[in-house]
Amino acid sequence: MATNKKKRVLTGSRATGMPHLGNYFGAYKPAIELQDHYELFLFLADFHALNEHYHPEENRLNSYRMLASFLACGLDPSKSLLYAQSAVPEVNELAWILSCQVPFGVMSRAHSFKDAQAKGLDINMGVFNYPILMAADILLFDANLVPVGQDQKQHLEMTRDMAQRFNHRFGETLVIPEPMISDTVAVVPGTDGEKMSKSKNNTVSLFADDKEWKKQVLSIVTDAKGLAEPKNPDTCNVVKIFSLLGTPDEIRAMREKYLSGGYGYGHAKMELLEKISATFGPMREQYNHWMGRQEDLRNLLQEGSRKARGLATEKLNRIQDRIGLIGRPY
Ligand code: AMP
């Protein structure tokens, strides 16, 4: 029988700081766009965040910032399931079960571990086990699709292998997820032209106040061409950022002004500033609204987490039964 049931897409985000345009175009916007076409499960990946250096109070504030950002940017919790990874302990229980099936050799070839090793970082077991926790996130909720960038392809392949190995050994239990290769999200450049990143101090904040937005936009690095001279739009950081926000006509118009001269970088920066304000101003209001109501944010997250836990409990009962553990169901 044909069914119209929407496919389930699962994606998690770590809360890493004051949200910036890179987070918006690389993470928030693409995730939120999924909610109209799929059954979207979106979780705060707060256990994943623990394997890096963090501070408890910063972690808490960043979690609220991320939730407020998703809501301000249009996530609808009545359409999508929003929950916290840390509120679903079954994720860790499944991670243990899976870890007892994965050969050490496979884990030691994971990109996340090898990259950390190549960078000479202190590697904790959270970094080493990361692909198993990721597999548990996905397999516990029967996700059909998982959006992955280039850096996550191998980890999703490992998830699929874990699921297949489990099903082969214990019978069909776990859904094999497919990668969802989104149209490659371009890297958003920062004010210095490098990848926009909190650690490089080159960000344009998503929800700064007007003064801060202006300061950030004016700090965008350009060459030293004078107002009258024609300029190259292809190499200019202002145009690159404007191109993420403007309509095709607006972008074309700005490019033409660059090429014909008589249009200074200051003019372009003011146009960009207006665009940022028009695009993100209304979202900023929503963001500030939510940030002033952290208790409401917490309740919303808990409500979603309770639903997620209900599903997780059922699934883990089945998994434990398959492998001959008799402690469940509960
Ligand atoms: P971060 O705050 O650097 O941990 O980034 C969180 C997520 O935001 C990443 O996984 C990306 O999806 C997205 N992101 C961050 N910076 C950029 C950027 N400059 N361009 C595109 N996407 C970005």
Image (tube, rainbow, N blue to C red):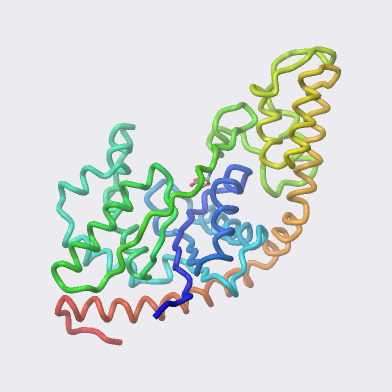
Q: Quadrant of residue 198?
A: top right
Q: Is 187 rendered above or below residue 27?
A: above
Q: Is 97 rendered above or below residue 278?
A: below
Q: Is residue 98 left or right of residue 215?
A: left
Which residue is rendered at x = 60% and y = 53% of the image?
A: 29
Q: Is 196 rendered above or below residue 15?
A: above
Q: State the image coordinates of residue 105 (x, y, percent, origin top left).
A: 15, 46
Q: State the image coordinates of residue 301 (x, y, percent, origin top left).
A: 54, 71
Location of the C terminus by quadrant is bottom left
Location of the N terminus by quadrant is bottom left
Foreground of the two, 139 or 216: 139
Which residue is rendered at x = 16% and y = 50% of the image?
A: 104
Q: State the image coordinates of residue 138 (x, y, percent, origin top left).
A: 36, 63
Q: Is 174 rendered above or below residue 237?
A: below
Which residue is rendered at x = 78% and y = 42% of the image?
A: 275
- Number of labelled discs? 0
Which residue is rendered at x = 76% and y = 58% of the image?
A: 285
Q: State the image coordinates of residue 176 (x, y, percent, origin top left).
A: 30, 63
Q: Is residue 108 left or right of residue 67?
A: left
Q: Quadrant of residue 228?
A: top right
Foreground of the two, 244 or 208: 244
Foreground of the two, 105 or 61: 105
The single residue placed furthest to the bottom in the displayed view is 330
